Amino acid sequence: MQAKQATATRTAKPAAPKRPNSLLANVEQLRLLSKVEELGLLSMAEKNGITLSTIEKSGLLSKAEELQLLSKLTDPATVGLLNTIGFVLLAAAAGVVYVVPDDSTSQIVLQSAGAAALAAGGAGALAGASLLGKLLK
């Protein structure tokens, strides 16, 4: 009986140490919190009316949980999806300039506003994909 216990003790594998969440570890490694602090992004957000109480009252956090956004952020496929969305939006911006005629002032304004909005969305999606790609490494 003692031989069986000794064998069981020797063959039992020790529990593997828990590895920290790679997303959080990369946030720390890239020093993103320090960069947010240095750039004054929180103060800038507060000046523009975005405070923690505003986020709380809007139900944004519970909505993020409901949509399972955190698990989607850690999915490597999300980077590819954001890249695709970015390129599609940039192509659509060029398409608006090509398709909308520029015969009148109102059409030029529509063309410019549409292209600018689509290009900004595309650039944001590509920047988000780049940042997320770095965080998931």
Image: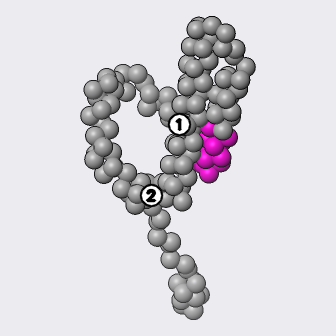
Q: How far across and down, in percent of the image, does residue 110 sit?
A: 60, 14
Residue at the outermost front position = 103
* Residue range highlighted in magenta: 73-86
**Which numbered dot is residue 26?**
2
Cα separation between marks 1 and 2: 21 Å
2 or 78, nearer to the observer: 78
Residue shown at the point (52%, 43%) measured from the top left: 127
**Which numbered dot is residue 61?**
none
Q: Is residue 5 in view?
A: no
The quarter of the rendered structure image containing the N terminus is bottom right
119 or 100, nearer to the observer: 100
Q: Is residue 104 left or right of residue 132?
A: right
Query: Is residue 91 depicted above or below 105 in this figure?
Result: below
Residue at the outermost bottom position = 3
Residue shown at the point (57%, 42%) measured from the top left: 126
Q: Which residue is mark 1?
A: 124
Q: Determine the secondary structure under disc 2.
A: helix
Report how many numbered discs are placed on residues in the image. 2
Which quarter of the figure has residue 95? Answer: top right
Q: Is residue 12 in view?
A: yes
Please, what is the dominant secondary structure of the magenta stretch? helix
